[in-house]
Image (cartoon, rainbow, N blue to C red):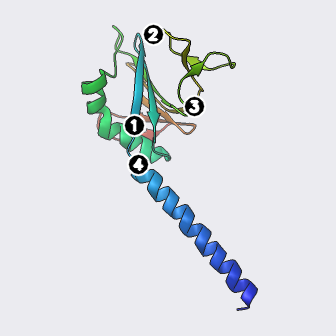
């Protein structure tokens, strides 16, 4: 191998190691729930350090749904049983409405009550469709027996 090739291979190995280390670090950080906002049977959960992969997000929900119910009273079903939970990345924090299409929480009595819309995970439950998980552009149905079916 020539010196140029050795240099290129070394650089490629170094970049791969840095990338692998970053992904490992991302996967080991715990999810931080910054705030929860409610509007009827809709719950908006603002998070930091949410898992990157679809499988990671779904596994996090399955492992933490009991904690969310106990600590935050999520979900809050309507009288007919349906509910929606949306997880948003908190990003740079709350901002004023100013910019077009920010998500604002009117349960906060301040002008700084909006976030950038950066949806990372959505859970819907209805009696007709059952429990549906929307993540990274795909929809999964969680059956009562625990099987996860990709429907879209």
N-terminal-most mark, 3 or 4: 4
- The quadrant in which residue 112 appears is top right
**Of marks 3 and 4, the one in the foreground:** 4
Q: Against 140, is 115 above or below?
A: above
Residue that carries the numbered disc 1 in the rendered image: 32
Q: Residues within 10 Å of mark 1 (few under 14, many from 20)?
A: few
- 150 up-or-down from 123: above or below: below
Q: Nearer the viewer, mark 2 or mark 3?
A: 2
Residue 29, which numbered label? 4
* Secondary structure under the numbered disc 4 in the rendered image: loop
Circles 1 and 2, Cβ within 8 Å, touching? The answer is: no
Marks 2/3: CA–CA distance: 20 Å
Spatial distance from mark 2 to mark 4, Cα to Cα?
A: 30 Å
| Residue topped by disc 3 | 118
Q: Which residue is mark 2?
A: 107
Residue nearest the viewer, comparing 94 with 129 = 94
């Amino acid at each position: 191998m020539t010196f140029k090739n050795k240099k290129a291979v070394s650089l490629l190995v170094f970049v791969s190691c840095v990338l692998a280390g970053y992904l490992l670090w991302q996967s080991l950080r715990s999810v931080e729930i910054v705030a929860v906002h409610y509007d009827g049977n809709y719950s908006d959960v603002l998070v930091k350090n949410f898992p990157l992969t679809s499988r990671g997000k779904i596994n996090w929900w399955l492992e933490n749904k009991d904690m969310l119910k106990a600590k935050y009273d999520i979900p809050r079903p309507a009288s007919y049983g349906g509910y929606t939970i949306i997880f948003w990345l908190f990003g740079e924090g709350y901002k004023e409405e100013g910019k077009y299409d920010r998500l604002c929480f009117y349960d906060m009595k301040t002008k700084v009550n909006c976030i950038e819309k950066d949806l990372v995970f959505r859970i819907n439950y209805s009696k007709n469709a059952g429990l549906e998980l929307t993540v990274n552009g795909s929809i999964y149905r969680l059956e009562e027996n625990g099987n996860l079916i990709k429907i879209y």
